[in-house]
Image: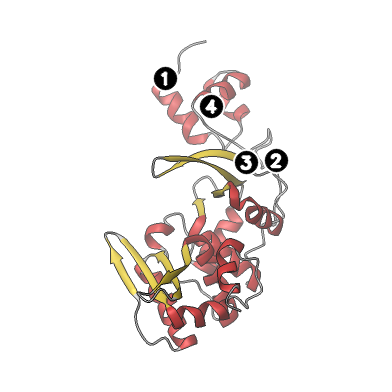
Amino acid sequence: MNKYSKEDLEFLVKNYGKITAITIAKYLNRSHAEIRRKANELGLRSTLNNIGVSRYIHNKEYFKKLSVNNCYWAGFLAADGSIDSNKNILTVSLKSTDKKHLELLKKELGFTGTLKTVITTLKDKKYEATKLYICGAQTLIGDLKNNFNITQNKSLFLNPPNIENSEMAKAFIVGYIDGDGTVCFGKTKQKKRYLRLSVLGTKQFLNWINEFLNESYAIGTKNINKHKNIYAYQISSLMARRVLLDLCKIKVPKLKRKWNKVNSLC
């Protein structure tokens, strides 16, 4: 088999997963099997079948009309999801200890594919993760952008969601806390336990959280700090207790390992 030219490799990398391997094979004048072998060698993955559509189905209209449940999952995706708007791929990866939560999202989206187990590295430590990978997700991606301002570069440019309903906004915040929030207990010098909430995000997004929680719970202060390029919203003690106990009442799935701490106060 002839070696791949630089142009051939660029074409393969750019288009694998967007168009079928058969189409690429015809364009590069190679066999279908050879294209798949080379793609595997390069670590390229595709969920397209031979007619160019996803092998699996999902509810494409899930984020079209706002509800408490889809606002929760949108908040979760705003924190932990990954969007490739060029390839129309939506992915979510969680530690395998949270696999059941990802199974809930899979069921909610009506996705007929399977969750994948992968080995990933975080802070030089390897761990097992569970991954949800949805191809052909252009409608989901479009609605996430239009309704919630969730885009491909959300980690740098996430803006507040377009939600007017208070309960739905709270559901979105609960989902975001489950992805990029920390709920924990601290101790005073007198060794008294207190509750603390910390949320990471963009400045403009955290400003929205701060303003919304101030209006809803009369917190009265701005609780956003910057460390290097990262912004964090933090509240603790009675303020955190008041907010988290109320958010806990929102009937959405919730990540149990975080909210069980709040439930212990009820």
Judged from the image, the secondary structure of the residue bearing numbered disc 3 is strand
Is residue 165 visible from the viewing direction of this image?
Answer: no
Few, some or many residues within 10 Å of mark 2 (<14, 14–19, 20+)? some
| Residue, disc 3 | 116
Instruction: Please tell me which of labels 3 and 4 falls first in the chain.
Output: 4
| Residue, disc 2 | 55
- The foreground one among 261 and 223 is 261
- Residue 162 on image: x %, y %: 51, 74
Colour basis? secondary structure
| Residue, disc 1 | 5
- Residue 205 on image: x %, y %: 41, 70
Judged from this view, the residue extending furthest toward the top is 1
| Residue, disc 4 | 39
Q: For marks 2 and 1, give the one nearer the viewer.
A: 2
Q: For marks 4 and 1, give the one nearer the viewer.
A: 4
Say which residue appears at 65% left-offset and 44% top-offset: 115
- Residue 16 on image: x %, y %: 54, 33
